[in-house]
Image (spheres, coloured by chain):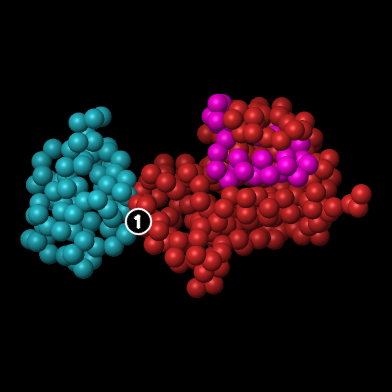
Amino acid sequence: MSIDVFIKNFAEQFDETELSIFCPELVFRDIDEWSSLTALSVIAMVDDKYGVRLTGDDISISKTVEDIYNIVESKLDHK
Amino acid sequence: MTKNPFSLEGKRVLITGASSGIGKVIAVECASIGADVVITGRDESRLNSTFLSLPQGNHGQIVADFQKSDDISKLVEALPKLDGIVHCAGVVKTIPFSFMDVNDLNFVLNINFTVPVVLSSLSLKMKKLIKGASIVFISSISGVYCSFIGNSLYSGSKGAVNGIVKGMALDLASKDIRVNSITPGMIDTDFIRGGIISDEQIQIDKKKYPLKRYGRPEEVAYAAIYLLSDASKWITGSNLLIDGGYTLN
């Protein structure tokens, strides 16, 4: 699993945000477009692409894109 | 002793989805107010724990997995004559509409709409519902009055329930069988915990209710009891909204 691909998949859940701002350190809640729907979309994307179930609490304890990536990675390790 | 029109004394009622959540509480409350209940659910040990928590009465339990059509016909065959059914079995699938596929749609529609409809129809065909019986569907505000982000499949299934209730009520009136629904707002059960919605979001959501909390399963049970009882003899094709004022906003 590569973080670059993850960031690309993450960025695809947004319609209006510039692709260039997405990086591991990005605090995703600061994106104007971030909403409860994007949170659900990230959860659905991770389920689709990685076969991992994130919970709402996984998203709420995360700050950056990398934090979510790390949770996905650790859940993949435990599969 | 004076007659209590709200009592379920002498009535036998089938409750689906009785191994947990709203269904479990409805089973216990119906039995407390005098009904003999037949409970059904998928998980044998959880269903048995509901069975053991029922107050005294002539109760029964039948394990059935509603994802298997064989289980549904076997359940109906095994049923005694009924004065009522409460359809509580249901699933939630929170997924943004753009991510859904036909399997998700079929899964939600099947458990929330098709199965309770087929179960009602089979019960009629096999003469399990007596004259004067009452069928109650636990629907939702979601799909009838409003919806929620990521909840379109669930909303679709519940909207369908409220639609068919009206048609069933018309067709079954000649048999003196009544059909009604209940549309609760969010009810505090394990259903909503540990899932896609975070605890933080739940706390924020509760504040949107004018009565400042989610509903309690008993509060849905009391409405089901009313619709099963002789107190509602002239009510059919109707819907009871129980939402702490949520849809007023």
For the point 66% across and 40% down, the residue is B27
Q: Horizontal and vertical percent for residue B161? A: 60, 53
Q: Which residue is drawn at 42% across and 46% down?
A: B193
- Quadrant of the rendered image containing residue B102: top left
Q: What residue type is labelled 1?
A: Glu
Q: On the rendered structure, is B43 left or right of A32? A: right
Front residue (pair B221, B94) = B221
> What colour is chain A?
cyan
On the question of residue B172 being in view, the answer is no
Between residue B6 and residue A35, name the one nearer to us.
B6
Whether B26 is among the magenta residues is: yes
Q: Does the magenta stretch include residue B187?
A: no
State the count of labels: 1
* Residue A13 is at least partly visible in this image: yes
Numbered disc 1: what chain?
B
Q: Dot 1: what SS?
A: helix
Q: Residues within 10 Å of mark 1 (few under 14, many from 20)?
A: few
x, y (%) of residue B140?
55, 56
Circle 1 residue: B200
Extreme-front residue of the structure: B1
Where does the image place residue B59, in percent across and percent down from the top left? 73, 31
Kindly identify the residue that appears in the image at 83 percent across and 54 percent down. B5
Whether residue B60 sits left or right of residue A21 in the image: it is: right
Q: In this structure image, what is the colour of chain B?
A: red
Please state the extent of the stretch shown in magenta in the rendering: B19-47
Q: In this view, does B218 lie above or below A32?
A: above
Front residue (pair B167, B26): B26
Image location of residue A74, percent across then percent down:
19, 36
